[in-house]
Image (spheres, grey):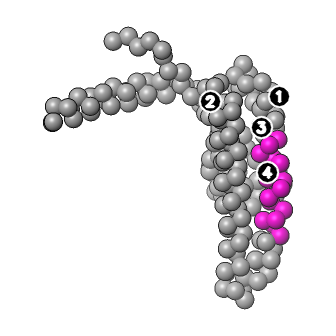
Amino acid sequence: MADFDEIYEEEEDEERALEEQLLKYSPDPVVVRGSGHVTVFGLSNKFESEFPSSLTGKVAPEEFKASINRVNSCLKKNLPVIVRWLLCGCLCCCCTLGCSMWPVICLSKRTRRSIEKLLEWENNRLYHKLCLHWRLSKRKCETNNMMEYVILIEFLPKTPIFRPD
């Protein structure tokens, strides 16, 4: 039984080494930052729809723009409600000892999850076939110490069909 475990571990090590080798040669991910004028808990009210030059030849500009527009429409639908609850929460914060901020936190979390589900749907529909993976990621702002959510477009490594032994 111990011999079987050792063989299994060696196979895992070989697979892990192959994955690391493929990841080493993949290009840096593309970062799509928020370009809106309102940011609530790091989530901007819209993302840049300008086509990044590093995606040329990987995805059509129309598909990129359609995907960003879907994310932006989700934000457009949810962020005004979050802002209203934020204002109400700030007004009542002293009376409720901060409990009036819970709806804002829950709505913000729900919006992030809906965007993540939308991006996962986009990945399954199109981008995984093109060896791309879109995800919502938390990054430090370039201008200050605050955190913001960005769309990270990662290049998936192409797995070889034939592996020489």
From where the camera sits, is residue 31 visible? no
Residue 137 image position (x, y, % from top left)? 62, 47
For marks 1 and 3, the one nearer the N-term is 1
- Magenta part of the chain: 69-84
Q: Residues within 10 Å of mark 1 (few under 14, many from 20)?
A: few
Locate residue 102: give its quadrant: bottom right
What SS does tag 2 mark?
A: loop
Indicate which disc residue 102 carries.
none
For marks 1 and 4, the one nearer the N-term is 1
State the residue at coordinates (33%, 25%).
14
For marks 3 and 2, the one nearer the N-term is 3
What SS does tag 3 mark?
A: helix
Task: Pick out the residue farthest to the left.
Answer: 2
Do tag 3 and tag 2 residues touch (Cβ < 8 Å)? no
Three-letter code, disc 3? Ser
Left/right of residue 165 with respect to residue 52 in the rendered view = left
Locate residue 97: give its quadrant: bottom right
Q: Residues within 10 Å of mark 2 (few under 14, many from 20)?
A: some
Left/right of residue 130 with respect to residue 24 in the rendered view = right
Gap between marks 1 and 2, in whole Å? 17 Å
Left/right of residue 85 with respect to residue 123 in the rendered view = right
Gap between marks 3 and 4, in whole Å? 11 Å
Residue 8 image position (x, y, % from top left)? 26, 31
Circle 3 is placed at which residue position?
A: 67
Residue 31 image position (x, y, % from top left)? 68, 38
In the image, 77 versus 41, the foreground residue is 77
Image quarter where the N terminus lies is top left
From where the camera sits, is residue 138 visible? yes
State the residue at coordinates (69%, 22%).
58
Circle 4 is placed at which residue position?
A: 74
Circle 1 is placed at which residue position?
A: 62
What SS does tag 4 mark?
A: helix
